[in-house]
């Protein structure tokens, strides 16, 4: 009986394992807390998500670490956002990779947990804040967020999910 159940479990395993949803290299992502929808780049080479922000200022509020910032996007208003800091990430500069660990520039970025909506799926994702205004896409979705969305990326496709439905 035990061997029959073991075989049954192995046969059922592929049925139980859901396939990831395939998205394009670029997708629309809504950040409800900011009341904004962004064109985002899906980047499997980046670990964390990044949002384009400027005037980033850390401060204390009720004993907790908070961050104050403005969006660094095209057509952004001067609205100031405040958010509790989840942690501070240390990002090694990519240009220093060939030189090894010695002398690598480390940038410290505040990380906040924000609700993101893609397609009809909503998740809380950690996002680091940095000025991405020189990039084409103000929001970058890294590997951790892609896993949270159970997403795979087909770089030949773009905006497959359409506008977020959350």
Image (cartoon, rainbow, N blue to C red):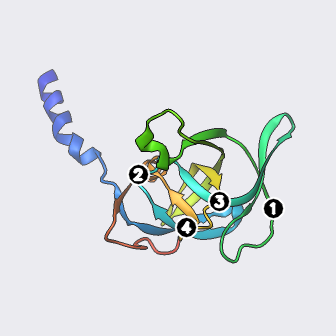
Up-down relation of residue 131 to residue 128 (above or below): below
Q: Provide residue 79's location: percent of width, then percent of height.
A: 80, 67
Q: Quadrant of the N terminus?
A: top left
In this rendering, position of residue 75 left or right of residue 116: right
Between the C-alphas of marks 2 and 3, the distance is: 19 Å
Question: Going from the N terminus, do you reach mark 4 or mark 1 first?
Answer: 1
Total number of numbered labels?
Answer: 4
Identify the mark at residue 45; answer none if there is no mark: 2
Cα distance between the residues tagged 1 and 2: 30 Å
How busy is the neighbourhood of tag 1: few (under 14 within 10 Å), some, or many (20 plus)? Answer: few
Residue farthest toward the right in the current orientation of the protein: 62
Mark 1 or mark 2, which has the lower sequence index? 2
The crowd level at tag 2 (other Cα within 10 Å; few <14, some 14-19, many 20+) is: few
Q: Which residue is mark 1?
A: 80
Q: Secondary structure at mark 2?
A: loop
For the residues marked 3 and 1, what is the alpha-carbon distance in whole angstroms? 15 Å
Q: Residue 100 location, x and y as percent?
A: 43, 36
Residue at 46 percent across and 50 percent down: it is: 46
Q: Earlier in the sequence, mark 3 or mark 1?
A: 1
Residue at (52, 74) in percent of width and height: 163
Is the Cβ of the residue at disc 2 closer than 8 Å to that at disc 4?
Answer: no
- SS at badge 1: loop
**Of discs 3 and 1, which sits in the foreground?**
3
Between discs 2 and 4, the one toward the N terminus: 2
- The circle on residue 131 is 3
Residue picked out by circle 4: 135
Q: CA distance from mark 3 to mark 4?
A: 9 Å
**Looking at the image, which is closer to me, 38 or 53?**
53
Q: Are marks 1 and 2 in contact (CB under 8 Å)?
A: no
- Identity of the residue furthest to the top in this view: 2
Say which of marks 1 and 2 sits in front: 2
């Amino acid at each position: 009986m035990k061997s029959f159940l073991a075989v049954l479990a192995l046969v059922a395993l592929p049925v139980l394992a859901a396939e990831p949803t395939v998205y394009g290299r670029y997708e629309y992502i809504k950040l409800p807390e900011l009341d904004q929808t962004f064109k985002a780049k899906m980047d499997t080479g980046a670990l964390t998500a990044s949002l384009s922000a400027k005037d980033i200022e850390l401060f204390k509020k009720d004993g907790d670490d908070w961050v104050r910032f403005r969006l660094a996007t095209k057509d952004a208003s001067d609205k100031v956002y405040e958010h509790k800091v989840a942690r501070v990430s240390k990002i090694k500069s990519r240009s220093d990779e060939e030189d090894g660990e010695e002398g690598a520039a480390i940038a410290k970025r505040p990380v906040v947990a924000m609700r993101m909506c893609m397609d009809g799926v909503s998740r809380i994702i950690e996002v680091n804040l940095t000025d991405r205004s020189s990039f084409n896409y103000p929001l970058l979705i890294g590997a951790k967020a892609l896993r949270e969305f159970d997403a795979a990326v087909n770089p030949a496709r773009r905006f497959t999910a359409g506008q977020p439905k959350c």
